[in-house]
Image (spheres, rainbow, N blue to C red):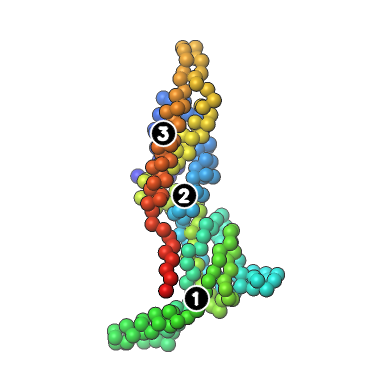
Amino acid sequence: MAQNWNTLLNYIKRKVGAPLNLLELTDDDIYEIIKEDVIPALSQYIGRPLWLRLSSSNLATVTNAENQSTYTIPVPTDTILVDVLEVYYSSASTSWGAYGNVVGVLDPRDIAMMNEFADMMSYLSVAQAYHFMYPNTISFAEQLQDDVILECKAVHSDLSTIPGDIYYDIFRDWCLAEIKEDVLAMRSKYEGISAPFGEIRLNWQKLEQDVMTLRQKVEAKLDAMPTEHLITFV
């Protein structure tokens, strides 16, 4: 099944009983609620993966001694960063530079020794700390000597970028909970509505219970997800 707005709207409408049950929200209303509330919140947990190159040309304007190593991240248009997960430095691969043209003729044992040497040099090198500042600034302990690659997490710009397991197992229920909660806010003002053929019971208490159940289900699955950062002390 495709991950698009049509299938998502159909799923939500089926779960709320439309069109047999009156739904106070239009398709555009549902679209805006999901786009403005659910997708940014989901992206804090599972964002769209993005890799960006950072160079000395991205050095931010220096106004004091504290930000001489602050850079402006070249974020593409219409992209919102959530976090920088990792920074990859070119120095990690410098040990291959002298052998780049002869790797094909090296003995496998030589390659294994080169890999071991690269690991040793990486271990002995000083760690370069960094700090991401929303929306597009990153600060390092020292100025960069070479270009680096930033592994970033961004807000999803389309439903298709959400991983399939997350989309079907968490995202759809999260959207449904959000829509039901908005409908609940409207219906909870009244117990019923008078109509020519009798009283229509809104039954908003049942809707409130549905929202609580969905919220608890989504939160439990989010809590069970593995963390993105594992901190170790050596």
The disc label shown at residue 210, or none = 3
* Tag in front: 2 or 3: 3
* Tag in front: 2 or 1: 1
Quadrant of the rendered structure where residue 109 is? Answer: bottom left
* Gap in angstroms between the C-alphas marked 1 and 3: 49 Å
Q: What's the residue at 55%, 66% (across, down)? A: 131
Q: Is residue 11 above or below residue 117?
A: above
Local crowd size for mark 3, using a 10 Å CA cut-off: few (<14), some (14–19), many (≥20): some
The answer to which of 126 and 21 lies nearer the viewer is 126
Q: Which residue is mark 1?
A: 127
Q: Secondary structure at mark 1?
A: loop
Q: What's the residue at 45%, 48% (across, down)? A: 159
Q: Is residue 233 above or below residue 206?
A: below
Quadrant of the rendered structure where residue 17 is? Answer: top left
Q: Secondary structure at mark 2?
A: helix
* Gap in angstroms between the C-alphas marked 2 and 3: 20 Å
Is the C-beta separation of discs 1 and 3 under 8 Å? Answer: no
Q: Which residue is mark 2?
A: 42
Relative to 113, is 66 on the left or the right?
A: right
